[in-house]
Amino acid sequence: MNKKLAYFCIALALSFMLTSVSYAATKGTEVSTSTKVKKAGRALFNYPANVATESANVVADTGKKGTAVVANATKRAGQVVTGDVAKTKELVTEPLTGTAETGKSAVEETVKIPAKAAEGVTE
């Protein structure tokens, strides 16, 4: 009878261990699933905000570059008017190249906005 009781206790202990390991594995899975759901929810709401932020940054940078082009053109015009005729070529070419470079950088940065916005969300 003592052997039967010992086997029963061993079997009972093994079943408790297996049940606790199974429960712990399930508990860990629930936490990771919950975390994934939270991250997905955050991404859903943060992505549009990140896009708006990146768009505002691009608009601000484009405005700064456009202002620099106008300031340089005004400076060159002042130099030409005051007698520095050698700057006449720069007076014509600088606004054109500056405007082209500003437009190019604006397009490049605009194309990068979705990727930049997604970087902040997936972290």
Image (cartoon, grey):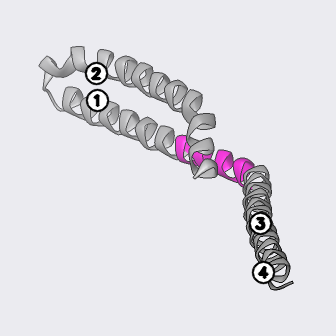
Q: Nearer the viewer, mark 3 or mark 2?
A: 3
- SS of the residue under disc 2: helix
Circle nearer the N terminus (3, 4) = 4
**For the residue marked with disc 2, what is the amino acid?**
Leu
C-alpha span from label 1 to label 3: 85 Å
C-alpha span from label 4 to label 2: 101 Å
Disc 3 target residue:
18
C-alpha span from label 1 to label 2: 6 Å
Circle nearer the N terminus (1, 2) = 1
C-alpha span from label 3 to label 4: 18 Å
Circle nearer the N terminus (1, 4) = 4
**For the residue marked with disc 3, what is the amino acid?**
Leu
C-alpha span from label 1 to label 4: 103 Å
Mark 1 vs 2: CB contact within 8 A:
yes
Left or right: 48 as drawn, with respect to 121: right
Expressed as whole percent of the image width and height from the top left, the position of residue 9 reads: 80, 80
Instruction: Magenta stretch: give its range.
Output: 46-59
Mark 1 vs 4: CB contact within 8 A:
no
**For the residue marked with disc 1, what is the amino acid?**
Ala
| Image position of 95 with respect to 7: above or below | above
Circle nearer the N terminus (1, 3) = 3
Local crowd size for mark 3, using a 10 Å CA cut-off: few (<14), some (14–19), many (≥20): few
Q: What secondary structure is the magenta-colored segment mainly? A: helix
**For the residue marked with disc 4, what is the amino acid?**
Ala
Q: Which mark is residue 91?
A: 2
Mark 4 vs 2: CB contact within 8 A:
no
- SS of the residue under disc 4: helix
Q: Nearer the viewer, mark 1 or mark 3?
A: 3
Expressed as whole percent of the image width and height from the top left, the position of residue 58 reads: 54, 41
Disc 4 target residue:
6
Q: Nearer the viewer, mark 4 or mark 2?
A: 4
Q: Residue furthest bottom?
A: 2
